[in-house]
Image: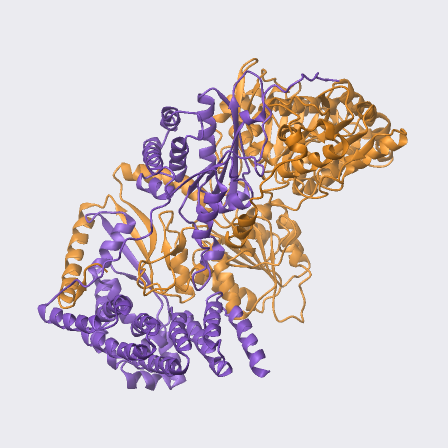
Chain colours: A orange, B purple
Amino acid sequence: MAERSFAKEVEKLRLGAGEEFSGEGILAITKALLQCGVGYVGGYQGAPISHLMDVLADAQDILGELGVHFEASASEATATAMLAASVHYPIRGAATFKSTVGTNVASDALANLASGGVTGGALIIVGEDYGEGSSIMQERSHAFAMKSQVWLLDPRPNLPSIVKSVEDGFELSEASNTPVMLQVRIRCCHVHGQFTAKDNQRPRMTVANALDAPRRDTKRIVLPPASFLHEKEKVEKRWPAAVEFIRSRKINEVFGPDIARVGIVLQGGMYNGVVRALQRLGLADLYGETRVPLYVLNAVYPLVEDEFLNFCDGKDAVLVIEEGQPNYIEQAFASMLHKACHTTRVIGKEVMPMAGEYTGQVMLDGIGAFLRERASQLLPAHIRAPNTTDISQDMSDLAAIVPGRPPGFCTGCPERPIFAATKLIEQELGPHHIASDIGCHLFSIMPPFELGATTMGYGLGPASASAFNSPDARRRSISFVGDGGFWHNGLTSSIGNAVFNRNDGVIVIVDNYYSAATGGQDILSSRASNRSKSTKHPIAEAVKGMGVKWVRHIENTYDVNGMRNTLREALSTPDTGPKVIIASSECMLNRQRREKPLIDTAIKAGQTVVKPKFGIDEDICTGDHACMRLSGCPSLSVKTLDDPLRDDPVAHIDQSCVGCGNCGEVADAAVLCPSFYRADVVHNPGPWRQFADRLRRKMIRALQNRREKRRLEFLDA
Amino acid sequence: MIGSSLAGTLAEDTGAIIKLAILAVGGQGGGVLADWITAVAEHNGYRAQSTSVAGVAQRTGATIYYVEMCRDTGRMPVFALAPAQGDVDILIAAELMEAGRAVMRGFVTPNRTTLIASSHRIAAVSEKIEPGDGRAPSDQVMATMKNAARHLVCLDLEKVALEAGSMISASLFGALAASGALPFDRESYASILSGSGRGAAASLRAFAAAYDQTSKAGQAEPAAASEARPTGKQAKGPARLLAQWQQLNVRIAAYPMPVQDMALRGLRKVTDYQDLAYGAEYLDRLDMAVKADLAAETCALSIAAAKHLANAMCYDDMIRVADLKTRSKRDGRVRAEVGINDAAVLQLTEYFHPRAEEFCGTLPLSLGRYIEKRPKLFAWVDRRINRGRHIRTDSMSGFAMLWCVGGLRRWRRSLLRHHVEMDHLQRWYKLALDRAGDDYALGVEIIHCRRLIKGYSDTHVRGQSKFDRVLSSLDDLRGRADAADWIRRLREAALKDEKGTALDGALKTIASFSRR
């Protein structure tokens, strides 16, 4: 069950021709797939297209009605390999994942798919995770398109353009027998907008039809001599076909005046940012009417040479807006102009930054600099010679004050106690080499835990510790991998590898019942029943099946003592081979979402329900914050007491506490302080319980009175 | 080619686009707020576009939502997908430091931006983990905000939301409506909330409260933190004790005016901790500082002594913890905090982890010393004592146990821990008073070093060690005019991190110049 439910929104997928669709970018993409008669869809979750997978999962009824097969693929490689169904059969298929991490994983399948080519349209929708808010290394998908010779679409970031791009993508793929990548950037995926819907199409051929009438063609299989022919076919047939399609169908767009001394060439995804900069420079209006000609590349690979040269005709210079590096597009255009002996200058990374996101300010500065230099007569006077007041001086002081706020573990996260235990074991046994992995558990590298030295890829945590295996060492390495990474790749690349190479390290598998960082999607070991997927496959069985002899399963990660003892045992046991600890507790975000409505209903129905919450006795807390150095929970914070005798703020637990128990366990395991208490509120207690409680409280009150009437009580303390 | 001819003038200037950014901490409901704003714009005949960055950034990190809107003319405008520096009309910050971040990033401009900020703080992890007070100072952010924005709305919208039983998104929506920054009337905002399903009633309450407070306050600043504090002379109890209490109060009345408040607070604390005799003991000690001050014609030493003597005399032992946890006042406070009435059933679990050290500290002096001097016996005791104990204070047995431990108060003066603490106190206090004779400021700083000692078990040991390390520099500092300043710096360094890395660095500096 995913973090966000699209159950209501997916009804929009049923809209018919002429009706207005209003909603988020990813939902529009799904609708476009159905309008194109897609036969099967697969993918792997990850921002920014996690929601696309969630939408598809929630839309299974609609997909089923249309005869569309949907898979939540095991990895991006699986999703891309699935597109093999379009190799021999005229079935349209789509795969989706996060790029470039997913594209990296998928590239083996992508290269094979691209080599043999496709018959049915094959569309790979990649969610570009680049710039602010990105959680991965900064690279470009463009390189993958170039090296495998698949076409890359980068539509303008509005719903009608994205929808059209999906339609174009399938047709382009079929016209050129080549898979097509469609890239959508983070904000584009979540942009809210409108487009006019068309009717959904049933696939012309379903996967069932294909299974009943199998086909094969040796020439499409990647093995010599066919593979040599594929390479030739790519440049002699498929490339020209793609260029012709892009040119004749006017996939790229030109805006603005026909005659001008300068122009701007841009990736489709940059369009809104470029227009905004022009608006601010007084050169474009609200609706994008511009005085500077724009050549918008909705297809960024391959480039259409004559289209570009035509655009350059009569212009002194064109500015290329190409985000990220290397600047492949700029280089290609420079080469085209050079070979055509064209006099137009290509300006690009001289005025735009080589690296980093093209934000509003970057666009304004870069385009402004280009125009001031090359076409200052276009600019209004107040832009050419602005009267600016500098307000930056007292802002800069703030940089020293405003604290950074990187993402971290959620309130009540079950992974927090795992790292608290790891920190405690390091206090006891000294620092260890710790290899981290991708997932929420990577937040361990940040304060307050500051654990983990590297992260090498999804499911590769233990693999990245594999060199640290030496009989001469007195310490073992510790590596982490999440349940998501474990099933994605870790079982073979990390666990199997460690068994085979007799690695002596400690491997902690962080099992929170979901692929949690990507939004709580189900995976093989999820504990929930899923109506269309097979779940409840224990990780422990898989690990043992791989040949691991030393396996410990902790079913409650909040048991910090237990966790620490198990770590100690794993680090000190004379047993050889990998020591695998599976630490399981449900992702608190998902658990709350699942349990909260049930509890509320139960309370309303008059059932007895016990709800926990933690608290702190502020007069017992001394304000050292040792508890926070082992927690970092958002609900555990500091509070100033209205007491001049106390210098330091004390710990405080706010209303958002979910009563996970970590605070108490940590205070116990680390022998911190007795100021924590757990308060369990018993809703709808039965009559016996109420009676017993009244009796107990009466006796307690008597004891309290006995002592309090003999001492001074200060009234306003 | 799709070329479009250019008219002489551009159709409309971009000022027609209203640009609104929301800076929030993940989990605050910024996405919900962005959706409401989009809805209210569309409801009023505007075209609107909202974007966000979902994913990892939502996990408690700083995150931005962005909305652009303009009057619907039938044509599709080109909206940007992210806020740009100097190009934001309305900035909503769901936390004070996020408002600071918005200003820092250039999203707030004096000639243009309406800044709607909640004045409450959510401490970042880096602020919470310092052993001292690591929180970023709010006043400078407030001051900069005022200069940076064209119009500022700043009040505690978290409190408004909590009081209405809702989320901050609803109160921010109310403040936005009341700010008049968007050309929409109150009813149209409210109608969006009415249709928001579950929690709509609470959202509307928070919306209305925020609307009213924002309109009432206008540009008002957040209310001043505190009014005059109560003097706290009132006490109640047996007449005999009250009479003695009055006598002690008379002694305080003889102190110089500036010392009286702190002395009274200290007296209350130690009396509450032990008894009135202990209070008299406290005043005896304080008298020494007051006497020293008479000569110096200032009160800094007495005020510092009034504060830290009280803290030192009220050391944290098992008896105090048990006493505090078994009071009726505490019961009431927990119930209020959990939010239940007197009739509901509440189960309370306390977390204790006593070790042999704490156990011996609670034994009579000679017996405690006897065990401590015998490592084998001590280890044997530790094996029996040292484990986590979860005590249910709502149960009779659990409560009675703590109540009995709290009752040991009567014998506290004869217990080992008391002797250890009082020895330490005497040495520290004497050192401070002695030094104050030659270097008054240094004496005051030594008094303040008592702040370093706090916590239980390992934390307490670490505090002691930092205290000792800071004072160990006194020899190196002997005769230096800036000795007091160095002690202050060392103390501040010691409060920076757990291990005392910053302190070690500062100590090395001192060692380096003392060698010269």
Does A551 sit above or below residue A133? below
Residue A681 drawn at (x, y percent): 28, 49
State which quarter of the image contains the C terminus of chain B. bottom right
- Can residue A675 be seen here? The reply is yes
Does B82 sit above or below residue A434? above
State which quarter of the image contains the N terminus of chain B. top right
Does B397 sit above or below residue A148? below
Nearest the viewer among B181 and A486 is B181
Q: How many marks?
A: 0
Nearest the viewer among A279 and A503 is A279
Residue B212 drawn at (x, y percent): 32, 34
Residue drawn at 67 percent across, 24 percent down = A165
Does B260 sit above or below residue B421? above
Residue drawn at 71 percent across, 37 percent down = A369
Quarter location, residue A380: top right
Residue drawn at 22 percent across, 54 percent down = B332
Farthest residue in the top direction?
A18
Quarter location, residue A315: top right
- Can residue A221 be seen here? The reply is no
Nearest the viewer among A470 and B328 is B328
* B52 left or right of B467 in image: right
Residue A635 drawn at (x, y percent): 40, 51
Residue B341 drawn at (x, y percent): 22, 47
Nearest the viewer among A203 and B433 is B433
